[in-house]
Amino acid sequence: MSERRTSVIPRTNRHGRAGLRLFVCIPVLLLAVLAVGGTSSILEMTPPISGLTLANLRDSFEETHNGHRHEAMDILEPRGTPVRAAVPGTIRKLFLSKPGGITIYEFDEKAEYCYYYAHLDRYADGLHEGMPVKPGDVIGFVGSTGNATAGAPHLHFAIFELGPEKQWSRGKAVNPYPGLVEAVKRSK
């Protein structure tokens, strides 16, 4: 059975010498790794849906959906619920795709991460590519477009670390769950 602690505990090793063991919980370790090299927009993220609670969040990043790794979170909300920009940034691409339906690709201010919002019912009035947004700005509305089940409207929310090419359609998937948990805690 593993212990989960966030402190340094002095111990005696098997040779009778004093030693230290560090016990760190996974979310704290993740946040520390993300913080190396400067502040990450993930650490400053706000919830993309107002009023979210921890009970609304479920880590589905590693699940298999439609034959591939999900690499996102689905946040179930009624159709038409406002979707808000999670970070300050720029709307990089508005796109209609078969799997994602009506989608938004938002780059953070440093163009290090892309925030992907999918299965939207529609965009917010006036939303356009190149538009700067602030956390909390309404950018769209929850729906079930693309390959989403019509009776289960939700926001498909993903984060991608952008490569040097800064392509909206390519990046390394980052699990949004730990960042959203912290964002929800901060929003209370």
Image (cartoon, rainbow, N blue to C red):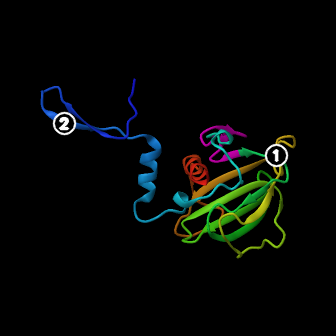
- Point out residue 5 in the picture as x, y percentages from the top left corner: 38, 36
Q: In terms of depth relative to the viewer, which is nearer, 162 or 131?
A: 131
Q: In terms of depth relative to the viewer, which is nearer, 81 or 1?
A: 81
CA separation in Å, label 1 and label 2: 53 Å
Closer to the chain start, of discs 1 and 2, is 2
Reply yes or no: does residue 57 show up in magenta. Answer: no
Residue at image position (76%, 64%) is 139
Q: In terms of depth relative to the viewer, which is nearer, 120 or 12?
A: 12
| Location of residue 76 with respect to 132 vertically, above or below | above
Circle 1 residues within 10 Å: few <14, some 14–19, many ≥20: many
Relative to 104, is 111 on the left or the right?
left
Which region of the structure is painted magenta? Answer: 60-74
- Point out residue 37 in the picture as x, y percentages from the top left corner: 40, 64
The residue pinned by badge 2 equals: 19
| Location of residue 96 with respect to 55 vertically, above or below | below
| Location of residue 77 with respect to 82 vertically, above or below | above
The residue pinned by badge 1 equals: 153
Q: Is residue 97 visible?
A: no
- Point out residue 31 in the picture as x, y percentages from the top left corner: 46, 52
Relative to 179, is 49 on the left or the right?
right
Question: Looking at the rendering, in which quadrant would you find the N terminus?
Answer: top left
Reply yes or no: does residue 61 show up in magenta. Answer: yes
**Count of marks, rendered view:** 2
Q: Secondary structure beneath disc 1?
A: loop
Relative to 19, is 82 on the left or the right?
right
Q: Main secondary structure of the magenta part?
A: loop
Residue type, numbered disc 2 = Gly
